[in-house]
Image: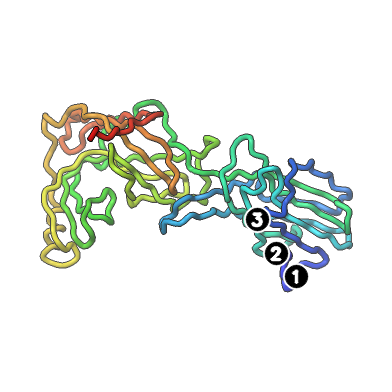
Amino acid sequence: MNIPSPIRRLVTPWVWCLLAAAAASTGLRAEDKPLSQPDLAIGLDVSEVRTGHVHTNRRGLEEPLVAPVIVTIQNRTGAAIQTSAEITGKDHDHAAAELVKTEETANGQELHLKVRGLRPTFEESEIFLTITLRQGDEIKATKSIPIRVSVPMLLKLQGETLFEGPASPGLVNRALNMRSAPKASVSHPEARFAAMCLHDVRFTVLDQYGDPLPPIFKGAPVWAALGKSDYEATNRILREDATFLDSIGFWEFVGGVSDMTVDPGRAEMQKFLSSPPPPCTDQQYTTYEPLLVQYQIGGYPIGSYQRQVTLKDSGDDHRPIMKIDFIPVLDPPVETPAPQ
């Protein structure tokens, strides 16, 4: 892709040339060419480009994610240098690069790029961002770094017991509707009142390489399916640190209002929220039936899990001990339609 003329004037005596993935080399990674003279240098602000791809964003659209990369070129030769940035390797079509701007700095001239993830890569993938310096037809130097296009793959777990301890927040009263988390099947401004026993768990999402997703996945929507139900939006999103919150526990609906934004519904809701929830009873201290839980992040399934909750008496009837067992299920059961 040729750089527009206003930008070219800014970067003389260099000439920048950014090549799209479709025009990139389809060969394997070229060996980095050593600098032919000490007055030329190529620097990058990362040793690996970690970009990504979201299949379904919060608007329901497919979205390539963008990783910024800064290339610094030092040229003290006094001669014009042509610089190109290419996506190379046999899997070059899994990403694309775009020039954002160029800047003069004390360290040299900076080339600001955006690398978009188009398709997932894997351990065996061969895809690189390659910077090449030329004078005429002669290549003076090259430098390549690998590109990883991450996608959500699984949850980070350590053992079968996800949590055991006093439930936090414990027993609470909440007003729920389709905008809340957890949510109820009524539309705002209607609200249903629920007495709840909850523990908030923070999950970390890993990519196909077993590493936490890069920060560019911030805001990816979290969907979940419980038991035999379909996936539904949870009103949770992925944080910058590759984590999301899920509230695990039990609740009972005990009332509701048709409009929580105006009186008398608003006053009734505030009274309910400020009232203490009923305490746990002896019958509630037990091990409950396991439940199949499935998650999606940005439209990518990240596994099926068997979740089982046990409540134990802690001496505080509003903060029981909650044990949460969470076991990956490789082949979730498929419901077979009953014969007609």
- Residue type highlighted by circle 2: Thr
- Residue in the image at 45% along x and 57% along y: 61
| Residues marked 1 and 2 touching at CB (< 8 Å) | yes
Q: What residue is pinned by disc 2? A: 102
Q: Nearer the viewer, residue 330 or 244?
A: 330
Disc number lying in front (2 or 3): 3
Q: Nearer the viewer, residue 93 or 334?
A: 334
- Residue in the image at 32% along x and 37% along y: 293
Image position, residue 254 (x, y; %): 11, 48
* Residue placed furthest toward the bottom: 6
Q: What residue is pinned by disc 3? A: 97
Image position, residue 37 (x, y; %): 89, 50
- Residue type highlighted by circle 1: Leu
Q: CA distance from mark 1 to mark 2?
A: 8 Å
Secondary element under disc 2, as helix, strand or loop, is strand
* Residue placed furthest toward the front: 340
Image position, residue 23 (x, y; %): 72, 54
Secondary element under disc 3, as helix, strand or loop, is strand
Q: Earlier in the sequence, mark 3 or mark 1?
A: 1
Image position, residue 195 (x, y; %): 16, 45
Q: Earlier in the sequence, mark 2 or mark 3?
A: 3
Side (left or right) of 94 relative to 23? left
- Residue in the image at 48% along x and 42% along y: 152
Q: Residues within 10 Å of mark 2 (few under 14, many from 20)?
A: some
Q: What residue is pinned by disc 1? A: 10
Could you say which quadrant of the image residue 244 lies in? top left
| Residues marked 3 and 1 touching at CB (< 8 Å) | no
Q: CA distance from mark 3 to mark 1?
A: 21 Å
- Residue type highlighted by circle 3: Ala
Side (left or right) of 256 relative to 202? left
Secondary element under disc 1, as helix, strand or loop, is helix
Q: Which mark is residue 254?
A: none
